[in-house]
Image (spheres, rainbow, N blue to C red):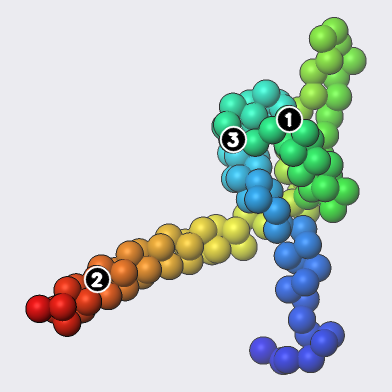
Amino acid sequence: MEHTMEACALDPALDVIVGKWKCSILFHLFHGTKRFSELQKGIPDITKKMLTSQLRELEEHDIIQRVVYPVVPPKVEYSLTEYGRTLEPVLSSIHQWGRSHAEHMRVRRSSLILEDTRQSL
């Protein structure tokens, strides 16, 4: 990988997906169109204000689309755009790496604890 300022396209990529809840939102939308309330139930710790904010940011980047149906009460659905679907393999790879990293750290902590125990004896 070339290491020049121009080659560092990580920054604009991370601008799109970084945010405490964006990956969770995208994970839910990878499984199909969702209403606001479905997303909120699927991510119970997120506030309405934060969910709205994160959805707007993803919409601004053309990652998701928001469709409002003219009914009473209003029905709003969120889904991935075709462009947003291109994130699925990227986030899937990051997800796999995260699982491997969590396991790596669990094993590392266990061996450090074992090593500390041995040194204490």
Q: Is residue 33 above or below residue 88?
A: above
Q: Is residue 40 left or right of residue 61?
A: left
Q: Quick one: label 1, few (<14), some, or many (20+) residues within 10 Å?
A: few
Task: List x then y, in percent, for residue 52.
Answer: 79, 35
Q: Is residue 20 visible?
A: yes
Q: Which residue is mark 1?
A: 48
Name which residue lies at 82% across and 47% down: 57
Marks 3 and 2, how far apart in space?
A: 32 Å
Q: Quick one: label 3, few (<14), some, or many (20+) residues within 10 Å?
A: few
Task: List x then y, in percent, for residue 22.
Answer: 68, 48
Q: Which residue is mark 3?
A: 45
Q: Is disc 2 placed on a helix, strand or loop? A: helix
Please tell me whether mark 3 or mark 2 is closer to you in this view.
Answer: 2
Q: Is residue 33 visible?
A: no
Name which residue lies at 78% across and 53% down: 83
Instruction: Determine which quarter of the picture holds residue 74.
Output: top right
| Earlier-in-chain disc, 3 versus 2 | 3
Please, what is the three-letter code of the amino acid marked with disc 2?
Answer: Ile
Q: Are marks 2 and 1 in contact (CB under 8 Å)?
A: no
Q: Which residue is mark 2?
A: 113
Q: Is residue 51 above or below residue 81?
A: above
Marks 3 and 1, how far apart in space?
A: 10 Å
Marks 2 and 1, how far apart in space?
A: 41 Å
Task: List x then y, in percent, for residue 29.
Answer: 65, 40
